Image (tube, rainbow, N blue to C red):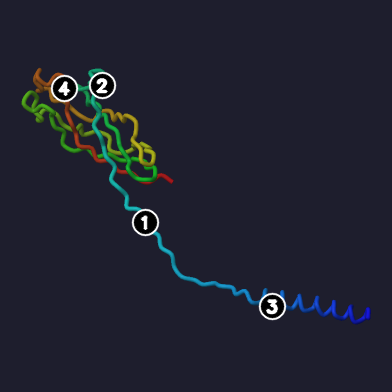
Amino acid sequence: MKTKKFVIAGAAVVAAVLIGGGVALATWSASGSGTGSALAYTAQPVTVNAVALTSSAASLFPGGPAGNVYFTVTNPNPYPIKITNIAWGTPVSANPAACSSSVISVDPSAPTGGLSLAIAASGTSGLTQVNAVLDLSSSALDTCQGNVFNVPVTVTGQQLP
């Protein structure tokens, strides 16, 4: 009788292992392959902004040395940039009726390279001062005193790592 119980118990254990193993073998695996996609960002142009000046920033006088230009740069891109070069357009008088634009010009030695202006992602630079850019002619009239002169500024640079 003991042997019979032992055989029945052993058969039950073997049956349980086979049934459990059968369940384990019944799970299927899955795999596959395909493609994913990503889109490269299209760089947005930076914006150069003139700065409202006070009399303490005045550096132009008739026949004097080349005066300074002040601006900020706004970077709308999601990565930091570094401005390294600058180009100057034709300056104009903010009040040509009182002070003709013909009395202002870009100095032949105005800096165009060697700039190192880092701007954070989606940020704006601090006040940037570039020295020795504009010449005020010795023929400028008294009505040019306190006049603002605007000069188009084009900056170039690259993404910072």
Find numbered disc 3 in the image and state the secondary structure of the residue it sits on. Answer: helix
Image point (89%, 78%), residue name? 5
Q: Residue furthest front?
A: 1
* Mark 3 to mark 4 CA distance (whole Å): 99 Å
Q: Is residue 16 above or below residue 78?
A: below
Neighbours of disc 1 within 10 Å: few (<14), some (14-19), many (20+): few
Foreground disc of the pair 1, 2: 1
Amino acid bearing label 1: Ala
* Residue 22 marker: 3
Image point (6%, 26%), residue name? 97
Percent x, y for residue 125?
34, 34
Front in this rendered view, residue 47 or 115:
47
* Residue 40 marker: 1
Percent x, y for residue 3?
92, 81
Front in this rendered view, residue 102 or 16:
16
* Mark 3 to mark 1 CA distance (whole Å): 50 Å
Q: Which badge, 3 or 4, is on the more N-terminal residue?
A: 3
Foreground disc of the pair 2, 4: 2
The quarter holding residue 49 reads top left
* Mark 1 to mark 4 CA distance (whole Å): 51 Å
Percent x, y for residue 42?
32, 53
Foreground disc of the pair 3, 2: 3
Q: Which badge, 1 or 4, is on the more N-terminal residue?
A: 1
Q: Is residue 160 left or right of residue 61?
A: right
What residue is shown with label 4? 63
Q: Residue furthest right?
A: 2
Percent x, y for residue 127?
32, 29
The quarter holding residue 71 reads top left
